[in-house]
Image (tube, helix red, strand yellow):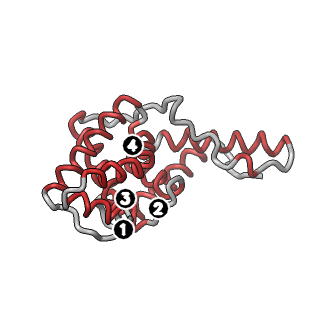
Amino acid sequence: MTDEQLAMSYIEGNNKAFDLLLSRTQSKLFTYIMFVVRDHDLADDIFQETFVKVITKLRQHKYTNSGKFCAWLIRIAHNVIMDGYREQRSEHIIEPTEDNDLSNMGVDLLDKNVENQFVNEQVLKDVRRMMDMLPPTQREVVYMRYYQEMSFKEIAEATGVSINTSLGRMRYALLNLRRMAKEHNMVLQLD
């Protein structure tokens, strides 16, 4: 059964369908939440709150089988995260934790020689540090696009914004990354 079929089966009263749906989606969802909030305990809380909302919405028949259950799930998590940010009313970016390591961004593929490998590792570390300095909405769209390989349409659906807004956030993220590289005289070219 697809995720969508499992969701519809749960709506019809099959609790085992929800258990299977949870086991299929929990890893991807938690990874997304953890990347955005960068705190394991907070990510656990958001994950649980997301699934409480999912259960509530399913029981209220507020899910329609559109073939995009995972995008619907991520959108709910996104809304929970944004509600948390609004409650905090703070503009700071949470520092990354050791559990949220993205340092293996394709370094294994770039082993022409030891010097190139060191240069490439440094470039990827620099990009990751600059990415951590982006505003949460820009960091989120970069993560969804490059790490989860989502289309801009899927990103728009997951975050509850238009495709143009998703594209705009990516554009500003890239402009900010270029500006940071220029300000720090960084050459971000892989060899």
Circle 4: is it few (<14), some (14-19), or many (20+) Cα within 10 Å? many
Residue that badge 1 annotates: 163
Q: Is 66 in front, or is 141? A: 66
Amino acid bearing label 1: Ile
- The Cα–Cα distance between marks 2 and 4, rounded to whole angstroms, is 15 Å
- The mark that comes first in sequence, 2 or 1, is 2
Amino acid bearing label 4: Ile
The image shows residue 164 at horizontal and vertical percentages of 36, 68
- The Cα–Cα distance between marks 2 and 1, rounded to whole angstroms, is 12 Å
Q: Mark on residue 33?
A: 4
**Image height of 190 relative to 114, above or below:** below
- The Cα–Cα distance between marks 1 and 4, rounded to whole angstroms, is 21 Å
Q: Mark on residue 70?
A: 3
Circle 3: is it few (<14), some (14-19), or many (20+) Cα within 10 Å? some
> Residue lying furthest left in this view?
60
Quadrant position of residue 124 = top right
- The mark that comes first in sequence, 3 or 1, is 3
- The Cα–Cα distance between marks 3 and 1, rounded to whole angstroms, is 18 Å
Contact? badges 3 and 1 (CB < 8 Å) = no
The image shows residue 67 at horizontal and vertical percentages of 34, 69
Amino acid bearing label 2: Met
- The mark that comes first in sequence, 2 or 4, is 4
